[in-house]
Image: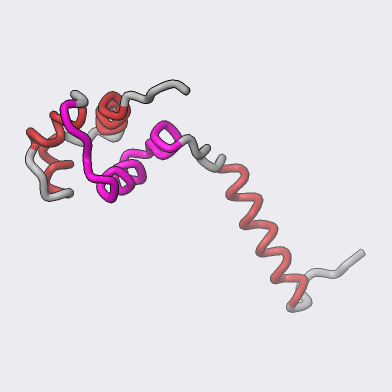
Amino acid sequence: MEKINIGKIIREGRINQNISQRQLADEYNVTPAAISAWERNKTSPPAHVLILLAKKLDIVEELFGYPKPKKEDENQKIWNAINEIREKIGLVRNS
C-alpha cells in the first residue's frame, strides 16, 4: 500500500483554497508554525483536526480514499427525492 504524504496534501489543499497558514492556524487555534510543521511532515495534526481540515480544504478523497460525490450524482439524488415526494402527494400523474 502506498504511503500518503499528508503534509503535501494539506499544503496543496490550503493553497488551492487560497488560505494562508495564519488563517488556518487562527481557525484551528494553533500557531502558523504548527501548520508549517504539518505541511512539512514534521508533526501531524490531531485526528479530529485532520478530519475538519479534510472537509474545509476539500481533500477528503486524497486523505481518506473516499471519492467525492460528483455534482451530477448529487443533483440526480435531489431530483429523485423531489419526484418521489411529488408522487406521494399527488402532483405527478403516472402515465
Instruction: Tell me if residue 62 is in the magenta stretch.
Output: yes
Residue at figure coordinates x 38%, y 36% from the top left: 59
Where residue 66 appears, x then y in whole percent?
50, 39
- Could you tell whether 80 is left or right of 14 in the image? right
The total number of labels drawn is: 0
For the stretch drawn in magenta, the main secondary structure is helix
Nearest the viewer among 14 and 61 is 61
Farthest-out residue, bottom? 89
Farthest-out residue, top? 2
Where residue 89 appears, x then y in whole percent?
74, 78
- Could you tell whether 29 is left or right of 16 in the image? left
Residue at figure coordinates x 26%, y 33% from the top left: 14
Nearest the viewer among 5 and 11 is 5
Where residue 8 appears, x then y in whole percent?
28, 24
Farthest-out residue, right? 95
- Could you tell whether 5 is left or right of 30 in the image? right
When asked about the image quadrant of residue 6, the answer is: top left
Where residue 77 appears, x then y in whole percent?
64, 54
When asked about the image quadrant of residue 12, the answer is: top left
Colouring scheme, one of rainbow, by chain, secondary structure, one colour: secondary structure
For residue 88, above or below residue 8: below
Instruction: Tell me if residue 63 is in the magenta stretch.
Output: yes
- Could you tell whether 79 is left or right of 9 in the image? right
Nearest the viewer among 12 and 7 is 7
For residue 21, above or below residue 48: above
- Which residues fall within the magenta stretch? 42-64
Q: Quadrant of the C terminus?
A: bottom right
